Image: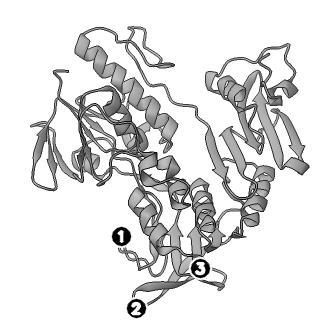
Amino acid sequence: MSTRIVVVGGGTAGARLAQRLPVTLLGEEPHAPYNRVLLADVLAGRYAPEVIALPEPREPVRLGVRAVRIDRAARTVECADGSLVGYDRLVLATGSNPVLPPLRGLRGAELPEGVHPFRTLDDCLTLRALVRPGVRAVVIGGGLLGVSAARALAALGAEVVLTQQGERLMERQLDAHASSLLRDHVEALGVEVHTECRVSGLRQRDGAVTAVELADGFVLDAQVVVLACGVRPRTALAREAGLAVATGIVVDDELRTSDPYIHAIGDCAEHAGRVYGLAGPAQEQADVLTDLLLAEECGQPARRAERVPTTDSGRPRYTGTRSLTRLTLGGAHPLDLAAFGEATPRPGDDVVQLTDATRTAYRKVVVRGDRLVGGVLLGDLAAVGALARAWEGDEALPDEAPLLHLLTHDGGSS
C-alpha cells in the first residue's frame, strides 16, 4: 500500500489489523502481540508464554515503543525515545488500563510490593514468580477477570480468597442461578469466596502488603493481592491531541475519530455510546477498518471480511458487535460457561431453562417477541453454536420451532 498506516497498540485489535495490512505497528510492551484472553492459562501453568502469541503481522512490530504525542497538523507520532513516525492514516488501538480501586494504602499508580493488576503478560509472569503453594492470595473483583485469576492462582497451590463487592460472581453476565453454580465450582477448587464484601484498604509492612481490610472490619491476611476491578479505556493520547473523548475515543460507523485521518479500534474506542472491552468486537472492528482502508487505497469497494456490513454506497461500516463471553474453569471436573445478551428477562419475555444437577449443567434462554435476546449455559455447551448464530444474526425465530428446541444440542437447527 502507498498509504502510510501507523497503528499505536499491539493488542488484539492492532495485531489483527497488522496481520491483514502492511502497517507500522508501535507496541508498548516488549513482547510480540499475544492473546490476552489466555493469560490465566499462562498463570496457571497450562500454557507457556510463547503458545499464546498471535499470528505474526505482515511487517515487523516495533516493540517497547511508547507513543507520547500526536501532531495532527504534521501527521506525526512522537515516541518516548524521541523518534517521530509519520502517517497518512493513524489507528489508535491503545487498549485499556486496569482500574485501581480507591483503597487506603494505594497511592496513584505506585503499588505496594505484592500488589499487582492482572492485565498484561508481564503482570502474569510476575505473579507466577511470586506464587508458591501455601501463599495467601486475595483477588479483589469477582467479575470474569477476577474469577479467571482466582482459578489460576488456586491451580498454583495458593490459598486464594476472592472478594466481590456485588451480590454474586460475574453479575454482568450471569443470572442468580448460574452465578450460584459458578460459586460452588470455584469454591470446590479451594477458593474462599466473599460476596457483598467491600474492600476498604491494604495493610503494609516495609512497603509490602500484609493484609486486606474489609469495610466491616474483617481482615484478610495476604502476601499477594490481585486487582481485578475492571478496565478503563486508554484515552490520554487521544485526549491530549484534541480528539473527541467520552468514556472512550468517540468513533463513527467508519471507525473515524473527530479527525478524519485518525481511527480508533478495540478497547479504547467508543462506538454509538458503547465501549466493548472484549476480543470479539476488537477483531470485528479491525476487520471493518481493514476493508475500509483497502477500499480507499483501491478507489473501489474491497472484498469484505465475513459478516462485515456495508452502506448503500458499498463502503464497509461498523454497526456494533454481538459476541459471547466464554470461560473454562479447570480442576478435577472442568466447568465451561457461555453467556450472551440479557440473561435477566423483562416482564413479558419468554424464558426456557433446563437444569441437570447431577452434571452441574444449566441452560437458559430469554426470548422477546420473536427474537432471542440472551442466554446462559454452564457445563454443557453443545447448543452454544446454534444459539450464537440465532442471537448474533438477530433474526426472527421460526414459528414452528418450540422454544425448548433452542436448548437442544442442535439449537433447533435440524
Quarter of the N terminus within the rendering = top left
Q: CA distance from mark 1 to mark 2?
A: 18 Å
Sequence order check, earlier mark of 3 and 1: 1
**Residue 384 numbered tag:** none
Nearer the observer, 337 or 396: 337
Q: Is residue 136 above or below residue 12?
A: below
Sequence order check, earlier mark of 3 and 2: 3
Q: Residue furthest bottom?
A: 206
Foreground tag (3 vs 1): 3
Look at the numbered disc 2 and give the secondary structure of its residue: loop
| Amino acid on which the number 1 mark rests in the picture | Ala
Marks 3 and 1 close (CB-CB < 8 Å) = no
Sequence order check, earlier mark of 1 and 2: 1
Spot occupied by residue 386 in the image (x, y as percentages of width and height): 71, 25
Residue at which label 2 appears:
206
Look at the numbered disc 1 and give the secondary structure of its residue: loop
Q: Is residue 318 above or below residue 54?
A: above
Spot occupied by residue 289 in the image (x, y as percentages of width and height): 35, 26
| Amino acid on which the number 3 mark rests in the picture | Arg
Q: Dot 2: within a 10 Å radius of its alpha carbon, few (fewer than 14), some, or many (20 or more) residues?
A: few
**Residue 109 numbered tag:** 1
